[in-house]
Image (cartoon, grey):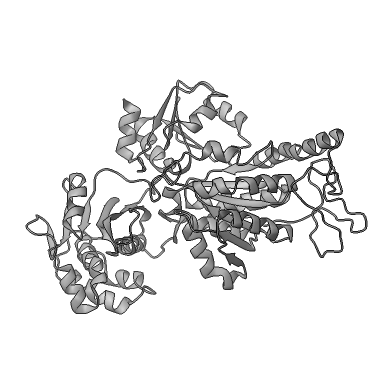
Amino acid sequence: MNDIQIIISGAAGDGTKATGYLIGKILNRCGYRIFIHEDYSSLIRGGHNFSVIRATRNNERCIREKTDFLLSLNEDSIEYHLGGLEEGTLIYNSDQIKDREGIGIPAETIAQEEGAIIMKSNALLGALCKVLGVDWDVIGDAFEGFPHSEKNLKVVRRTYDSQEKKHQIEKEKVASPMITGNEAVALGALEAGMQSYFAYPMTPSTSILHFLARLKEEYKIDVFQPENEIGVVNAALGCAFTGKRTMIGTSGGGFALMAEGISLAAMSETPLVVVDSQRAGPSSGVPTYNGQADLNFALSPGPGDFLSLLVAPGDAEEAFSFSNLAMNIAWKYQIPAVVLIDKDISESTFSFDENVIEGAEKWDEKKERNSKNYQRYQITEDGVSPLAYPGKKAVVKSGSYETDEYGVSTEDSEMIIKMQEKRMKKEDYIKEELSKKEAIKIYGEGDKILFCWGSTKGAAIAAGREAGYKVVQILVFKPFPVEKIREVVEGCKEVVVVESNSSGQAAEILKKYILVGRKILKYDGRPFSKEELIKKLKE
C-alpha cells in the first residue's frame, strides 16, 4: 500500500470534488503524500466529473493508468473508468447502478435518511475507508470544519460499519498541509507583501480571486473584481502607481486583453505581477481543460521591445516560491513579471512542503528619493530609477509616452535611445540575481535528457526514473538560462522535450541553443500519465 490511486466519479453537482479532497485529506493524515487531479466539464449540473487521488510514499505527482479503487455514483462513470480498474475494487452507488461486481452501497438512500442527497458521495467514502483499514478517529479529524460535518459523519459511519477491513493503513502523527497551485501562488505573493489583487473570473485562475477574498481581512489586502480584464490591468497599474504591491490573474483570453496594459507597465516602469493560468485554446478553447500554448505569447506580452520576467512553476511549492520571486523582482527592477502556470497546477491539490516558506523574501526598498529635484526616470548604473509615489513630497510623473529623466514626454532621438537602453540595462542585473536561484532543476542522472516545464514535471520525473532519463525542468523562461542549459546537456546522447501543446513551443526555444532530438507533445487537454510517457520515451 505504498502507492494508491483512487478515482471518484459522477455528474457535476454530485459532490465528487469535495469527497475526493476528503479522501486525500484522510490519506494525508495516514502519512501519504497527496496529488489530486480534477477533471470536469463546463457544466454546473450533469456531464461527467471525476477526481483522481494519488497517494504515495515517494511523492509522485502524476496520475497513472491503473486504478486501485473506483468510486462510481452513476453508470456513466463506470463505463468511463472501468478499463483502468483491472484488479482493483469497484465501490458503487447501488441506487443508480445494478448488477456489478464490487461493493454496492445504496448511497442515495443512506444520504437521504441521514441528511441530504448531496452527501451520497460520502457514503462511498465510508466504505472505502473501512476496506483500506483507516481508523475512525482519522476520518473524524478530516471532517473537522467541513460543512454539516455531523450529518456527513453519520452517513460515513453507516457505510464504514457495513464493510470488512481488507488492509491496514496506520495513522501518522504528522500530516503535511494540502493546497492547490492557485492557493500557493496567492500565499507566495502575500509573503512578498502583496497589498492588492485584481481579477475578472476566468477558469482556471478564478480560485485565486476567491481564496484571497476570504483572506482580505486577515491580511489587510484589497481584493477587487472590475468589469473586465482591461479594467483589471488598468486598475492594477493605478494601484501600483500609488505604491501598493499589486498582482492580477487571468487565463489566455484575458491575458490577451491585458497585453497593452502590460506594455504600459513596461514603458512607465510600473511594477506589476501577472498570473496567466493556461487552458486549452486558442480563443475560449476548452475552458476547463489543460494546455501549455501561451508560452510564446507570455514571452512578449505586449507591443514593443521591453524587459519582463517569465517564470513557470511546476507544483505547489514552486508556485509559492516563484510568485514570491516574481513580486520581488517586479518591484525591485520596476518591470512586469508573468507567473505562467496551467490548469493542472492551478486546480490540482498537492501535499505542501512548508520548508519553502523559510526561503520566501520580502522587498526592501533601498533607492533614495530627492523630493526637491525628483527624477522619476533617472539614468542609473543598473537602470533602476528611484521610485516615489504621489503624496510623498515629490512630483511624480508617469505615462505611456517616452520621457526624459523627469518624466516629461520627449521625441528627442538621443533621449529615446538613452531611455530604452536604461530600461534594458536592468537585464544583466536580473540575470545575476537569478543565477543564485534555481532557474532549472535536475532530477536523476544519465546521458539521455528529458526536458519538461509546468505541469508536465510530475509525469516527467516519474517516467524518467523508470525509462532511464535525466529530467531537466525549466523554471525561468525570461531571461532564459542559456548557460545552465548548455552545461547540463554537454556530452549527452539524446535530448527529448515533453510539453502540452501542439507546436512544441519550449522545444523551439531550446533549439536556438542546443540540439533537440524529438518532441513528445500532448494537446487533448488531459495530463500525461506515468505509463503513457514511459511508452512514448521507449518508442
Residue 456: name its quadrant: top left
Residue 371: name its quadrant: bottom right
Q: Is residue 122 visible?
A: yes
Q: Residue furthest left?
A: 99
Q: Position of residue 74 (x, y in %)?
A: 18, 59
Q: Nearer the viewer, residue 309 or 483?
A: 309
Above/below status of 466 relative to 169? above
Q: Nearer the viewer, residue 70 or 200?
A: 200
Q: Position of residue 19 (x, y in %)?
A: 30, 64
Q: Position of residue 427 (x, y in %)?
A: 71, 38
From the viewer's perspective, tell me whether residue 534 is left or right of residue 124. Answer: right
Q: Is residue 437 visible?
A: no
**Residue drawn at 44 percent across, 50 percent down:** 345
From the viewer's perspective, tell me whether residue 489 is left or right of residue 85. Answer: right
Q: Residue furthest right?
A: 372
Count of marks overlaid on the render: 0
Q: Position of residue 132 (x, y in %)?
A: 22, 60
Above/below status of 262 relative to 123? above
Q: Nearer the viewer, residue 69 or 42?
A: 42
Q: Quadrant of the C terminus?
A: top left
**Residue drawn at 33 percent across, 40 percent down:** 530
Residue 435: name its quadrant: top right
From the viewer's perspective, tell me whether residue 256 is left or right of residue 461. Answer: right
Above/below status of 405 relative to 508? below
**Residue drawn at 58 percent across, 27 percent down:** 487
From the viewer's perspective, tell me whether residue 481 is left or right of residue 147. Answer: right
